[in-house]
Image (tube, helix red, strand yellow):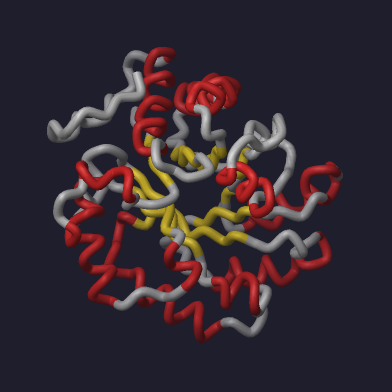
Amino acid sequence: MRLHVGCAQWTHSAWADRQPNPRERLRSYAQWCNAVEGNTTFYATPKPETVRSWAAQTAPEFRFVVKLPKTVTHERRTSGAEQPLREFLSAVEPLGPRIHALWVQLPASFGPTDLGALAELLRQLPEHHRCAVEVRHPAFFDDERTAARLEYVLGRVGAEWLPFDTTTLFASRPTSPGEREAWAKKPRVPRRVRALTEFPILRYHGRDDNEATVAGWRPWLDVVAGWLREGRSPTVFIHTPDNSESLLLARRFHTEVRARIPELEPLPEPAPTGPMTLF
């Protein structure tokens, strides 16, 4: 039984003492967390040598959730994007089994009338890769029939609905520049806890205040523990406005789930570094 946890990135200026080698920051990150969001692929398809370096720095069981390029999902809205999609899939292939899921993040304007285009995109993705879809249009959360239609499209190819829980972020007014920026950029949608597959993925966004972040994720502890007891294999990503402490927060989330399920395999202990604690 294993829970994978991680962050939105694998390097941060606040983690410099943990990543002394600029060429191997991912290797250092992988001592702390066993999954990462591949957000960089949204902005540009990486070069093959870059991806081979990512693979060399991580174990085969490390999980990448790699985001499809914005050219595919946002600029072309999944239609007529066969060429950039092929280039992306070819570029990330050196990750091999480390590709836990291909992540289709759709813009908030991508609504129920676009489900046909989504279905066509999902049919183009290789069957040997599982897929996770993140939607942001309010109708998918406000209308049960619309949600059921999306679940049907996802279920036909065994794809997961990837929730981004920002309810803690929006629970009270922002108190810092980072929180104000997050308020302006992050989606405000209801919390969704239903898993469709054996491999649920959660993105959770907290606050600058670590204890507010921890308090906000408490409902998820029972949900994730339940998934594990059901035999599912979840992956959880922890976000905060500046992500400076997300590395330790991700490990803390794992620790709190393990308190509910003692048989859960612990995360490996990273090599000793300078003082930095969240416990």
Q: Is residue 248 left or right of residue 236?
A: left
Quarter of the image with the N terminus in it: top left
Whether residue 200 is visible: no
Q: Is residue 130 left or right of residue 91?
A: right
Residue drawn at the location 25% of the way across and 53% of the way down: 26
Residue drawn at the location 43% of the way across and 52% of the way down: 37
Q: Is residue 71 left or right of residue 278?
A: right
Q: Quadrant of residue 137?
A: bottom right
Quarter of the image with the C terminus in it: top left
The image shows a total of numbered marks equal to 0
Q: Position of residue 38 (x, y in %)?
A: 42, 58
Q: Position of residue 148 (x, y in %)?
A: 78, 47
Q: Position of residue 239 (x, y in %)?
A: 50, 41
Q: Indicate whether 93 appears above or below 276.
A: below
Q: Is residue 165 left or right of residue 264?
A: right
Residue drawn at the location 58% of the way across and 45% of the way down: 177
Residue drawn at the location 64% of the way across and 45% of the way down: 180
Q: Indicate whether 193 appears above or below 19.
A: above
Q: Quadrant of residue 249?
A: top left
Q: Indicate whether 255 appears above or below 165.
A: above
Q: Position of residue 2 (x, y in %)?
A: 34, 31
Whether residue 14 is visible: yes
Query: Closer to the camera, 110 or 29?
Result: 29
